[in-house]
Amino acid sequence: MIEIEHLTKRYGALAAVDDVSLTVERGQIAALVGTSGSGKTTLLRMINRLVEPTSGRVRIDGTDTAALPPHLLRRRIGYAIQGHGLFPHRTVAQNIATVPRLLGWDRARIAARVDELLELFQLPPAEFRDRMPHQLSGGQQQRVGVARALAARPDLLLMDEPFGALDPVIRAQAQTDLRRIQRELGTTLVIVTHDMAEAITLGDRIAVMEQGRLLQYAPPREILTAPATPFVARLIGRDERPFHLLSLTCVADLIQPGEAEGPPLAPGASLRDALSLCLWTGRAALPVEGGGVVTLEALRRAAEGRSP
Amino acid sequence: MTGRLALGLAAILLLAFLLSPESFAPLLRPLTRNGAPPVYTQTSLLSLTFSHLGMVAGAVLAASVLAVGFGVLVTRPFGRDFLPLARTVASVGQTFPPVAVLALAVPVMGFGTGPTLLALFLYGLLPIFENTLAGLTNLPPQVIEAARGMGMTPAQRLWRVELPLALPVILSGVRLSAVIALSTATIGSTVAARTLGEVIIAGLLSSNTAFVVQGGIVVGILALLIHAGFRWIEGRAAGWTRARS
Ligand SMILES: Nc1ncnc2c1ncn2[C@@H]1O[C@H](COP(=O)(O)OP(=O)(O)OP(=O)(O)O)[C@@H](O)[C@H]1O
Ligand SMILES: [Mg+2]
């Protein structure tokens, strides 16, 4: 659990982060969104003390981070940097092994962990282990950066726009993988993103920042249906709102009894996918695997923000 | 490829000349007048070369240790205040002519190797220091940030990330110093240091062009070989910047 209390960082007259308080429960994902320069990176870096706060404090599982030597604190916290920051003179495997080596793991354990992570991020170990960072594509570099952050199985993971350079397909895959890994290990995750859709699919809660201030910190549904300020509403994008709302719920939650034509939909698909299929195929109802249907009518109601 | 071939030939030529200078006498004879000896024989050329190289190596090594050490110190958070001062001192050192260093050092240290070593050492400092600073202050900020974020201590960052990344630049400073020292060492023989300058000076004193030419060519080829050797090491140290196919 991370408790951020009245955290402020000033650079001269500018308050890069201005009196921010928020709590991330253990095993939850907090997504930080906001315009460029709103203080997201600064807030994130105060958690692992890469930036020392001007005032306020951060507690991790009840311990004040100011009480620990910074390098020991950081070895416990995974950190995926904006733009990867891989060590250019080290191989992919050596990069991933950085924190385990600092922690003094033995060779065999490190090698096994490296291969496990490479597999996880769909980078075949035999092919990628011994490559140098400049021999990877931008997307591959980012994935190695994330793998490096996860290497020592940290309880807490900080990520600064980790998927910025990925194409939509790999990006969606990386998000799904991250979500799965995070759920499996019970990792607490704070992720900065510019992509509202990413914040909504990943975040248990979304923190919206503007000029160093925290405008709203709430679950995605609440951010979408009850934005605290006009700025929050603008950031979500009014046009996108119904689609974001639909993407939060899966088909299983909207099943009605009945029958319909056509190939069945997976119960885990999002309502957004269902709507898209309805519109594309011109049907008013879709069958769901295992029985029942979703209707266009029900989808329409869900898109208005009424609970299904 | 042709460059390597030329270097190899130069090295063989140099070796042959140093091992058996007499066999080159016919080639050098046209440069002499009045039946003067075409090949310098007062001292063995081989031993002069070793002594010359030894002096250069010693001075450059000492200069490297000190200059890199200082470069590291003034780029640490506690040393940043000294950065401008250290820069000034090092460049003033460079503007002092080597002959003046010799002239000032002789009364204190006496004739021989000492003053020459001192001059070479002082001369070697600046290029290495400047390059160490350039290497350590132009590191990619994200990489340093990542090193901090992973939980490396300042010493671990220095040894595992900063120095390896700055190494090619530092080495090119050492190369520059070595090549400068190699030619500067020749004037050391004016204060009785045993260097290849002895051959050149003997040639100048006795108007024997053959001596001047052989001294000059040996120093020149040595400089070429040292330059190429360092370039090769620098390339190895910067291996991560190029595709290894
Ligand atoms: N070291 C620093 N010195 C002075 N000002 C800084 C420093 N670091 C950040 N700032 C300022 O603080 C503000 C917040 O910066 P920050 O990097 O946290 O923004 P961000 O929300 O991460 O932006 P982006 O989305 O572009 O990454 C900016 O106005 C920035 O210029
Ligand atoms: Mg940022």
Image (cartoon, grey):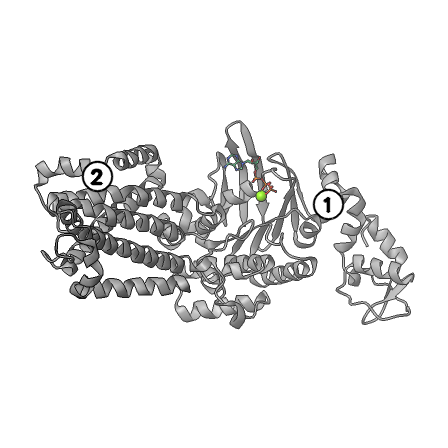
Note whether A46 is above or below B178 in the view shown.
Answer: above
Of the pair A36 and B7, the residue shown nearer to us: B7
B47 vs A172, left or right, is left
Graded by Cα atoms within 10 Å as few (under 14), some (14 to 19) or many (20 or more), the crowding at tag 1 reads some
Estimate the x, y position of residue B243 in percent, counting from the top left.
50, 62
Of the pair B84 and B225, the residue shown nearer to us: B225
Residue B24, located in which quarter of the rendered image?
Answer: bottom left
Q: Chain of mark 2?
A: B
Residue A202, located in which quarter of the rendered image?
Answer: bottom right
- The residue located at (49%, 34%) in the rendering is A55
Q: Amino acid at mark 2?
A: Pro
Question: What element does badge 1 sit on?
Answer: helix
Graded by Cα atoms within 10 Å as few (under 14), some (14 to 19) or many (20 or more), the crowding at tag 2 reads many
Q: Amino acid at mark 1?
A: Glu
- The residue located at (78%, 63%) in the rendering is A252
Estimate the x, y position of residue B79 in percent, counting from the top left.
32, 38
Q: Is residue B55 visible?
A: no
Estimate the x, y position of residue B99 in percent, counting from the top left.
19, 38
Q: Which residue is mark 2?
A: B98
Of the pair B111 and A104, the residue shown nearer to us: B111
Q: How many marks?
A: 2
Real-space CA distance between mark 1 and mark 2, rounded to the nearest whole angstrom: 77 Å
User: Which label is found at residue B207?
Assistant: none
Q: Which residue is mark 1?
A: A222
- Specify the quadrant that holds the C terminus of chain A: bottom right
Estimate the x, y position of residue B89 in percent, counting from the top left.
27, 34
Residue A228, located in which quarter of the rendered image?
Answer: top right
- Select label 1 or label 2 by which is in front: 2
